[in-house]
Amino acid sequence: MKNISKILFLLPLLFISCGSGKVAEYTLEVVNEYPHDTESYTQGLFIKDGKMYESTGLNGKSTFRVVNMETGEAERRLDFDKKYFVEGSVIFEDNLYILTWESRIAFIYDAATLQYKSSWKYPREGWGITTDGKQLIASDGSANLYFMDKNFKLDRKVTVKYEDRPVRWLNELEYIKGKVWANVYTSDEIVIINPRDGSVEGIIDCRGLLPKELYAADTDVLNGIAYDKNADKIYLTGKNWPKLYEIRIVEKR
């Protein structure tokens, strides 16, 4: 989410691959790959009605884009003032919601036209955001998920846990088949969360998704999960990555 050097010293020990057998463990298979703009510091990624949308961060470089997946280029684009570090984004009902990090401002746009509608004082740091179609679901870099109405009124909060231990640094989110998928910031893992009680039901090992030979000086961490519900396809990318991947998960044996 942020520059790694700012919080690297706070990283927890990775909880992945403990071999307890209580949680499903998965690896990835790449189904297809697409170009991705290496200037995109990916903070939010989602698909709605066959179109891919992406929000990108960093002060002075923050954008929201409607992306042509075949070319990786922006078909439409919003640029933000340099004082804003844009974070996650999602379309819920007729609105496009875009979060910011330390500014704690949430922007609302018309989802069809991308016309500005309003801005709200957001009650916490903006990180990831998704929807189950009934509520907004957001992260703030802690182990918590927040379930809110369209005006950010909190309905409930759950703490995400792996074997009774909080899973911190929850970042970009996607709602897939009744579960919340979350990037764990600065790691190569995605956790699959039961939204009812916050329990981790699956861990996806994404190590090696982007080949080492494609790394550049500014290549950053895995971040960005998009689910095409109509086509039943899942896509992953990372900050400043040159590739977007359609993937499927395979349970480890």
Image: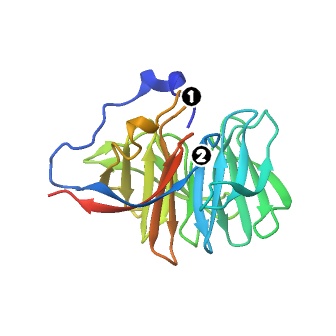
Which quadrant would the N terminus be assigned to in this image?
top right
Q: Position of residue 5 (x, y in %)?
A: 51, 22
Identify which residue, 245 or 11, lies in the foreground.
245
Residue 201 can be seen in this image: no
Residue 32, percent across and down? Answer: 43, 61
Crowding near the residue tagged with mark 1, few <14, some 14–19, many ≥20 C-alpha atoms within 10 Å: few
Check disc 2 and report its element: helix, strand or loop.
strand
Q: Amino acid at mark 1?
A: Asn
Number of marks present in the image shown:
2
Classify residue 90 by image quadrant. Answer: bottom right
Question: What is the distance, in whole Å, between disc 2 and disc 1 at their CAs?
Answer: 12 Å
Provide the residue designation for mark 1.
3
Q: In the image, residue 201 lies at what x, y percent? A: 30, 58
Q: Is there any visible trace of residue 84 in the rendered image?
A: yes
Q: Residue beneath label 2, please?
A: 43
Q: Earlier in the sequence, mark 2 or mark 1?
A: 1
Q: Is residue 20 above or below residue 181?
A: above
Q: Tell me the amino acid under the disc marked 2.
A: Gln
Quadrant assignment, res 69 = bottom right
**Residue 25's image quarter?**
bottom left
Q: Of 251 and 180, which appears nearest the observer?
A: 251
Viewer-closest of 31 and 107 = 31
For the C terminus, give its image quadrant: bottom left
Color style of the picture: rainbow
Residue depicted at 37% across the width and 42% down the height: 188
